[in-house]
Image (spheres, grey):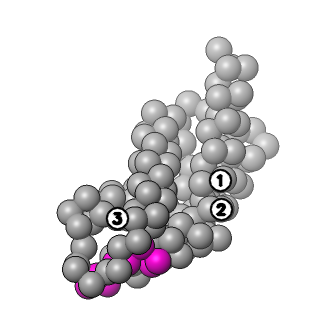
């Protein structure tokens, strides 16, 4: 995974999280099925989480002599896997209410993953700036 690919994954997860916040605020009862836009965000999130489950072991272009990126990549992998399970459960429902999406967003796994990604992104910027 390159730093640009990681940035793309971070963007997808962040955009989805924000969309889910807006969806949760709509008060949808869930009785009318799943909207195409919600379905698309869930699908993209699920796919991106699958890519993040690969971790940072093949991260290219970043010096990691003490293994700090690798260790944090393992944390990210676990959080991505756990979040992917929650997204998968949500996607498996025949109708999705605002409350269900609110619970997904409130999941400690989803929030931990966001924090992991922001931490890695900032550390990556610092590391790449010092190498340049």
Query: Where's residue 49, x and y in %?
Result: 44, 61
Residue 57 is left or right of residue 23, and the answer is right
Residue 12 is left or right of residue 109, and the answer is left
Q: What residue do we see at 46% from left, 43% from top? A: 11
**What residue does disc 3 label?**
42
- The answer to whether any part of residue 122 appears in the image is yes
- In contact (CB < 8 Å): disc 1 and disc 2: yes
Query: Where's residue 128, x and y in %?
Result: 64, 25
The residue at the far front in this view is: 27
Label 3 element class: helix
Give the magenta-colored segment's residue range: 92-100
- The answer to whether any part of residue 87 appears in the image is no
User: In the image, is residue 41 above or below residue 30?
Assistant: above
Q: Which mark is residue 116?
A: 1
Q: Earlier in the sequence, mark 3 or mark 2?
A: 3
Q: What residue do we see at 75% from left, 38% from top? A: 65
Q: Is residue 98 magenta?
A: yes
- In contact (CB < 8 Å): disc 3 and disc 2: no
Label 1: how many Cα within 10 Å (few below 14, some 14–19, many 20+)? some
Please tell me whether mark 3 or mark 1 is closer to you in this view: 3
In terms of depth relative to the viewer, which is nearer, 63 or 121? 121
Q: Earlier in the sequence, mark 3 or mark 1?
A: 3
User: In the image, is residue 94 above or below residue 105?
Assistant: below
Q: Main secondary structure of the magenta part?
A: loop
Label 2 element class: helix
**What residue does disc 2 label?**
112
User: In the image, is residue 131 above or below residue 29?
Assistant: above
Query: Where's residue 87, x and y in %?
Result: 43, 72
Q: Which mark is residue 7?
A: none
> Which quadrant, please, contains the C terminus?
top right
How far apart marks 3 and 2 lie (CA) works out to 18 Å
Q: What residue do we see at 48% from left, 59% from top? A: 21
């Amino acid at each position: 995974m390159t730093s640009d690919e990681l940035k793309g994954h971070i963007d997808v997860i962040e955009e989805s999280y924000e969309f889910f916040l807006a969806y949760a605020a709509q008060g949808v009862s869930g009785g009318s099925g799943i909207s195409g836009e919600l379905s698309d965000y869930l699908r993209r999130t699920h796919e991106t989480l699958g890519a993040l489950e690969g971790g940072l072991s093949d991260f290219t272009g970043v010096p990691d002599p003490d293994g700090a990126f690798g260790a944090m990549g393992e944390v990210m992998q676990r959080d991505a896997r756990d979040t992917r399970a929650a997204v998968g459960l949500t996607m498996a429902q025949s109708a999705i209410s605002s409350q269900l999406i609110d619970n997904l967003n409130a999941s400690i796994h989803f929030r931990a993953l966001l924090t992991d990604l922001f931490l890695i992104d900032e550390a990556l910027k610092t590391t790449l700036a010092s190498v340049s």
